[in-house]
Structure formats: C-alpha cells, structure tokens
Amino acid sequence: MKISVIIGTYNQKSVLEKALNSLFHQTLSPELYEIQLVDSSSNDGTDKMVESLKPTCRFDYLRVPNQGKAVARNIAIKKAKGDIILLTDADMIATPDLLEQHLLAHNKKEKACFEGLTINPDGKPYIQVRLRPLQKLKWAYFLTGNLSIKKKAMVEAGLFDENFKGYGWEDIELGYRLHQMRIPLFYLPSAINYHDHPVSRQGMVERKFEMGRSAALFYKKHPNLGIKLFIGINPIAMGIFHYIKKYPTLLKKISLKAPASGFFQYLLEEYQYRLGLEEGLSKN
C-alpha cells in the first residue's frame, strides 16, 4: 500500500459519488492505494449511496459525529495504511493519473509534499499565479484539495488542529507548521483534479465570515507580525472595515450593489471577513 486517499464529507452525496468513481478508475494499480472516507453523520443518503458503490481498490467508510472537517480528516489519517497521504475533498473529481503522478513525484523527492493543479468550475486554476513544474512553494499554498505528503510527516507535525470548526485555514495552518519543520512544498501541475462546487456570490459572503473567524484562531496560535499581516490585519484594511461598520447606510448600499458589481462584491466579502476576524479575536 503506497497511497491513502483521505476524504472528509458531510451532505455531499451527489458530487461525492462522482469523486469516488473518479478515484476507483485510476492508472495506478489498485493494490497500491486505498480510500479512507470519513462521513460526519451526513443525513442526505450518503450512507446508502456508498453501499451501492463498486470499489476497485481498498475502500473504508466510517460515520462519526459531526465535529468538523479537521476531526474527520485526522480520523482517516490515523486509519490510513499508506506511506503517502493524498488529501482531497468530496467535491474534487480526479483525472485518471492523479495518484500515479503524486506517487512518481514522491519517488523522486523523498522528504517533500506536493500541491497538484486544481481547476475551478470556471475553468481557471485555483492557484492563478504563474508557476513552474516542481517550483518550491510558500507554505501558504498548502491547500488540501489536491495535496500529498508522507504520513510520518503529518503525524510528526501533529495532524490538523481540531479547534478549527468553521470554514478555512486549518490546512494552511498545518502547512505553516510543516514549513517550520523544514519540509518543502512543491508544485505538481501534472496531478490534476477538478473542483465541482460552484459557489454563489451570497455563499461566498457567508463563507468569508467563517474564514475570518478561522483566521483569528490561526493568529492566536501563531501571534507574530508575519501571520498578522498574512491574515489581513493591517491599518488600511482594518480602517476601511471600521469606516463601513460605522455607517450602516453605507454597508446597505454596498450590499445592494454587490450582486451586480465585482468591486462592491469584493468590498462586501472583505467586510464580512473582517467581521468574522473581529469576532474571533474577541473570544478567549
């Protein structure tokens, strides 16, 4: 067993079925990989769907109480039998050679982790800066929709911090710890998957608030200037936030214009992010 694919899921039955079927049909020999799926007590029929599947590789399914993605993933990682962990999501559709490409990369670089190429629903790559194959990446690119790493390194780093309950940052925070352990992260554009989860503008506004709260937890764990600036705590951004917050009529105008304007959508998202950040920082 070389690779353990780790997926945490909650109420994603339809897209999860497509994701699993893409993983059942890989160019990598079936005896070389497994799938560990941990379900945080979905109530949409995920369990019945899983019963109908026809896995071509080792496939373990476990239902657990809903305690967030970090908890689900950690359970799956502890159960994993492969030397390499492939972290992905229930809404990621793998290309046929995804696992083979990650394995080939690890065979070339022993102590490293690899960030693959994820394509968004709009056809654009999730990481939109220009990168070279096998370019060394900053820890901020530790994005776990398409990422592989040795299980030993994950365990030594302490796995995901289970205090992250809302959306965002639990993966990047782990990447920061791995960076401190001097484990390099490389870009692997030959390992491709597709993100099958369009997010509406309103959905993104709601998500930004959760991201802000998670960012506050990140900063509390690592209270240094670098992290403070990285999560957006700077005088200009916070000054704009407090100005908008001071004038509710201005916020209302921004909210009304956001659905039809990229600029006002951006302002609203940034406002919601810092609202969540402020709330998170105020908690003990």
Image (cartoon, rainbow, N blue to C red):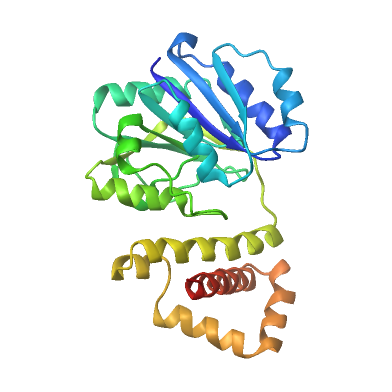
Asked if residue 55 is positioned above or below residue 266 in the image, the reply reads above
Q: From the top left corner, tell me how far across and down residue 85 is, in percent.
A: 41, 29
Residue that appears at 32% across and 43% down: 157
Between 234 and 176, the one nearer to me in the picture: 176
Q: Quadrant of residue 159?
A: top left
State which quarter of the image contains the N terminus. top left
Residue that appears at 29% across and 38% down: 156
Any part of residue 47 in sight: yes
Residue that appears at 60% across and 71% down: 272
Residue 50 in the figure: left or right of residue 145: right
Residue 21 in the figure: left or right of residue 215: right
Q: Quadrant of residue 94?
A: top right
Asked if residue 136 is positioned above or below residue 176 in the image, the reply reads above
Between 18 and 78, the one nearer to me in the picture: 78
Residue that appears at 67% across and 86% down: 250
Asked if residue 275 is positioned above or below residue 97 in the image, the reply reads below
Any part of residue 124 in sight: no
Between 183 and 102, the one nearer to me in the picture: 183
Q: From the top left corner, tell me how far across and down residue 257 is, in percent.
A: 72, 75
Q: From the top left corner, tell me how far across and down residue 38 is, in percent.
A: 58, 32
